[in-house]
Structures are given as C-alpha cells and as structure tokens.
Image: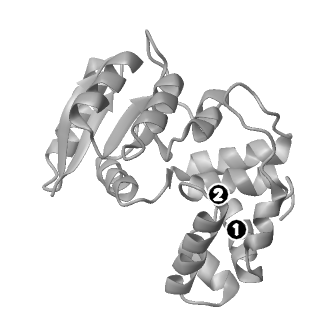
Amino acid sequence: MAIRVVVADDQELVRAGFGMILDAQPDIEVVGEAADGEQAIAAVREHRPDVLLLDVRMPVMDGLEAARRVCAEYPATRVVMLTTFDIDDYVYDALYAGASGFLLKDVRRDDLAHGVRMVASGEALLAPSVTRKLIGEFTARGRTPGPHRPPRAPSRLLEQLTAREAETLRLLARGLSNAEIAAALVVSEHTVKTHVSNVLAKLHLRDRVHAVVFAYESGAVVAGES
C-alpha cells in the first residue's frame, strides 16, 4: 500500500516540486496540498495521510500551530516540518508540538523520498545539520518552558531504564545513529534497536527526536558534556 502524503507550503512551486518528486515514487502518493496551516488541517481531516510535510512559516495559521493541532487530533499522521533555515525557536518548539522531524527545502530528491519512508515507518527524521544545531542549542544555553514547551521532564521515569538503556539514551542525545551506538556499546545494531524501542516505550516518547529532548530536559544529559 502506498504511503499517503499531504504537502503544505505557501509557495506553489515548492508544493508542485515536492509533489512531482514524491508522486514519481512507486510507493508514495501525494493525496493533497495546502497553502496555509488551516488548509493543512483540512487536508489531513479529509485524506488522513500517513505523512504531512508542513512548512514552518505560512499565512493564516503557521506550521507550528498546525503541527500541534494535527498531532493532537490525528496522531496516526506523522508530521515533518519543512524549513529554509537550520533551526530557530519555531523549529525547536515544533518538537514539543509533536513533529517527527525536519527537512530543509533544498533537500535532494532521493533524501526527500527516503525521509518520507522513514517517518511513515515510525522513525524520526532530522537532517544532520539540524541535529547538530538542536544539540548545540542545549549546549549553549538552558531551555525554559514556553507556550509550547512543557516543564522539565520527570526524572522518575529514568529510573525505569536499565543501565544499557540509559546509556543508549545518552548516546541518542549526542545525535549518534544506531550503527554508531552499536560501535560505542560493542553490541549489534539489532540490540541497539531493541534498546531504543525499550527507551521510547518506558519514557512514553513518540520517537528518537523526542528522546533527545527528554534526555536534556530530564537531566539525563547535561548540556556541554561529551
């Protein structure tokens, strides 16, 4: 069954370009487009896509608010934010809204299709540059709760993790891939996947993106530590 996608961006050329690239894939179908946040929510309501590609900055309703509503009302739809910049507070806050990842608008066509497949399968998606910037944000300064940011994550949840799961979380927070974590722990990638799955389940997290946020917010990882 094809992965159903809605593309939401206020630039018609972006919508058309992404739509053409994705529709050319045998396993992906673009079922709707939207030019602003309200249209994006309406398209999700009508088509119930597997993935929503959502521009951060749009008229009428911005992508952050649209992401928050879609993630709350249609949890089966995975949201990927589209941005022309690496990261700022809007992108950071989108994590708390429930977004599963980010793609820069200059993404290569193969990476675009691969990203959609990753998110549809339940994985999180962060461009390498965004991952570095995100971790750098924590390293440079502490984060404080805001309108879209919850208070500090409860550390009691960390007590449920085994020693290996806790170490896996710390490595995730450094932006390491499964292969890199496997090398660091001297275990197989299959074992790492099991650890990651257990971490997400025990901490009630959607995906790896939110594991990174939780690790810093809970104090499992201290900003600036190696």
Q: Return the residue nearer the eye: 24 or 188.
A: 188
Image marks 2 and 1: residues in contact by CB distance under 8 Å: yes
**Vertical arrangement, residue 206 with respect to residue 159, above or below:** above
Q: Which quadrant does the C terminus fall into?
A: bottom right
Residue annotated with mark 1: 169
The secondary element bearing badge 1 is classed as helix
Residue receiving disc 2: 211
Q: Mark 2 or mark 1: name the one nearer the start of the chain.
A: 1
In the foreground, 145 or 13: 145
Q: Height in image: 172 above or below 55?
A: below
As drawn, is 165 to the left or to the right of 18? right
Residue at position x 63%, y 77% from top?
Answer: 181
User: Disc 2 versus disc 1: distance between alpha carbons?
Assistant: 7 Å
Q: Position of residue 105 (x, y in %)?
A: 41, 35
* Residue 35 visible in this rendered orientation of the protein: yes
Asked where in the image residue 60 lies, by quadrant, the reply is top left
